[in-house]
Amino acid sequence: MPTRKVVFPSSITSTKRTIEKKKQQQQKKQNMAIPALFATQPPLLDQLQTDTSRSQAEVVGRCVPFLRGEETGLPLNGHGVQSLARELHVEYLLDALGEYPGRFVGLDASRPWMVYWALTGLALLGEDVSGFRRRLVATAAPMQSGSGGFGGGHGQTAHCASSYAITLSLAMVGGQEAFTLIDRLACWRWLGQLKQADGGFQVSVGGEQDVRGAYCAMVMIALLDLPLELPLDAPARKAGLSLFTSGLPEYLARCQTYIDLPSLISWLSARQYAPEGGFSGRTNKLVDGCYSHWVGGCWPLIQQALSDSESESEPLAALYSREGLTRYILNCCQSQHGGLRDKPGKHVDSHHTCYTLAGLSSVQHKHVNTTNASSGSLEAAFGWMSSPLSINNDAAAADTVYEARDRLAALHPLFVIPHAAVDAIHSWCRANPISI
């Protein structure tokens, strides 16, 4: 006789599917290799509670469920690590380059940075950003001061930070239209006004002086192939300085708290926390996704310094946990709606999206400088090469917990833009020297 077919109500069918899905997820989690270091509360806790320790405990409490794979909106791999939501992040960054509502007017002076963060993030994700060339040139042109450098917006004072961001952005979109926009002669003269008698740089004429200004200035001088000689009317010449590099190493040494390499390595290593796996920016501060670059980006430079020293070079994997940083970035910083954040509970933004992705890129690549550092010029800055690290099941990939599809593009460790962009603008500038 015919078999009678039993049809369950949709609510029961849905419940059964949910239970089955949860069983499958539970089975998958049991098969995941998640080290206890990144999945459990710290074994030792100070009994003295402070605002700092309570904030730290709160962050750990938020991170652990993500690190265990319990709070996920994205697929997990066999290591219990979320996949990179590449398409969602691209969509988020493209939107970040669009129009903003009126309430964002307070960020007007940050427009160069907002452009740089979005373009760099897109380049890391493998997108071609040259299509933004015309828009960027039109945006940047009114920001350029007649006396050199770029301000944050039309008519604003030229500043090292905004000039740095615009210069790097123009380098990324590439092409003669972008390169010729920069008045390199005026920029050289303007930077000469910022050079100080003690070897450092102001961030703007009459502005504050700090290592930020020195870094941004030297990036522009190197990338744009500006003469190292100071303009004749540079105030620093009265103190006997003749080059942009004069007195700069001594100035930077005076700014350092840790002036020897072992102490610097110790301090940087202490910035990585467990179980989170991410970096903090200062002692007794919380982990933050953007320090994946600001601290994580130091390791290629440290490794090169160790390789150049007489002491035997340590393997890079021994200096910090690549696995820990990967787990923090992909599990704790990604939003399932696109963009990356400081930490769970925070909102995404283009700043954290850019620098968190930059940190992940650094994790995935080996950076080596092949030039002679004692050449006495800035050419060593252009001798960096990057190669992807192994993701095979061998000793070299012991701390690799991401999949091949999650690989990002490499960034130049000094200029923090793709290598091809560095080569293109520097080659063009060398072929078109300025006349002083």
Image (cartoon, grey):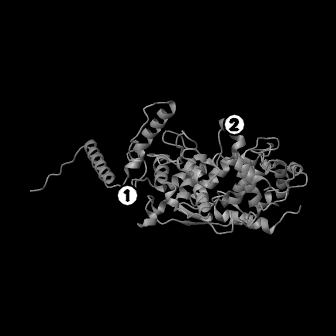
Nearer the viewer's eye, disc 1 or disc 2?
A: 1
What residue sits right under mark 1 in the picture? 78
- Residue 365 image position (x, y, % from top left): 54, 62
Q: CA distance from mark 1 to mark 2?
A: 44 Å
Instruction: Depth check: give the residue in front, 27 or 90.
Output: 27
- Which dot marks residue 30? none
Instruction: Depth check: give the residue in front, 435 or 88.
Output: 435
- Residue 135 image position (x, y, % from top left): 71, 54
- Residue 214 image position (x, y, % from top left): 74, 50
- Residue 414 image position (x, y, % from top left): 66, 58
- Residue drawn at point x = 71 percent, y = 50 percent: 252
- Which dot marks residue 106? 2
Q: Quadrant of residue 302?
A: bottom right
On the rendered structure, is 77 left or right of 430? left
Q: Secondary structure at mark 1?
A: loop
* Location of residue 66 with respect to 79 vertically, above or below: above
Structural crowding at the residue carrying mark 1, measured as other residues with C-alpha within 10 Å and reported as few (<14), some (14–19) or many (≥20):
some
Q: How many marks?
A: 2
- Residue drawn at point x = 53 percent, y = 55 percent: 360
- Residue drawn at point x = 58 percent, y = 63 percent: 311
On the rendered structure, is 46 left or right of 104? left
